[in-house]
Amino acid sequence: MKVKESKTVRSFLAIELKEDLVPKILDVQKEFKKINANIKYVPSENLHFTLKFFGNIDEDMIEDISNSVEKVIKDYSSFDLNIKDCGCFPNKNVIKVLWLGLDEGSPIKDLQKDLDVEFKKLGFKKERNFISHLTIGRVKSPKNKKQIRETIERLENIEIGQMTVSRICLKKSTLTPQGPIYEDIKIFELN
């Protein structure tokens, strides 16, 4: 008897960015590109808000994850996100990730918490300090850190705009030398 080998998929759950906001985000990236810094920018087609990064999972888990998402989102309707503010992780002295944030009152935090409760039942670790953000770039070295910090401070209160979230996507991430390629595994519509 042959044992069925299960394939693994690198995956995450995300909210995609609305197309009309992309030019404003590219403008923010352009401000950082004026600095001669070692930053790898997220391509426009890969911009998203991550609700949960699963890592490499067995393909068999996709159905369980999908069922958990379906269970949680039946309690959620479409909602608006207001994208604003520029910041970095972990802090301004050690800058690794450049991001844009959201209004504090956004339902995204509640949605993420409710999803996390279900994903924990499937064996995934709960997020400790979930901070809703849109990664726009990753700083690869401390080159010109002072200028990076000054640009973050100048853009700290930037207003990008509002979008309506009407669906969330389970995505596959294939790593390539040119960067990750994302594909939809499943799309979940909000009421």
Image: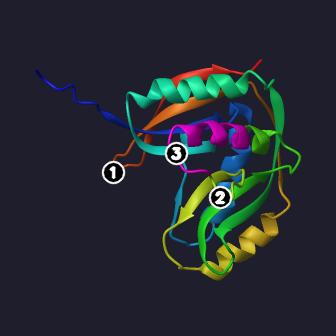
Q: In which quarter of the image is residue 187?
A: top right
- Is label 1 or label 3 in front? 3
Which contiguous range is marked in magenta?
112-126
The image shows residue 88, relative to residue 164, as above or below, that is below
55 in the magenta segment: no
Q: Which of 64 and 167 is in front in this view?
A: 64
Q: How far separated are the C-alphas under marks 1 and 2? A: 31 Å
In the rendered image, which residue does mark 3 sit on? 124
Return the x and y of residue 89 as percentages of the image width and height. 64, 67
SS at circle 2: loop
Q: How far separated are the C-alphas under marks 1 and 3? A: 28 Å
SS at circle 1: loop
The image shows residue 60, relative to residue 116, as above or below, that is above
Upstream in sequence: badge 1 or badge 2: 2
Residue 188 appears in the picture as rendered:
yes
Residue found 79% across the figure and 63% down from its top: 155
Upstream in sequence: badge 1 or badge 3: 3
Residue found 57% across the figure and 37% down from its top: 13
Magenta-colored segment: predominant secondary structure: helix
In the rendered image, which residue does mark 2 sit on? 128
In the rendered image, which residue does mark 1 sit on? 177
- The answer to the question of whether label 1 and label 2 lie on touching residues, with beta carbons closer than 8 A, is no
Return the x and y of residue 101 as percentages of the image width and height. 76, 53
Q: Inspect the image, locate mark 2, and give the three-letter code of the amino acid beneath it.
A: Arg
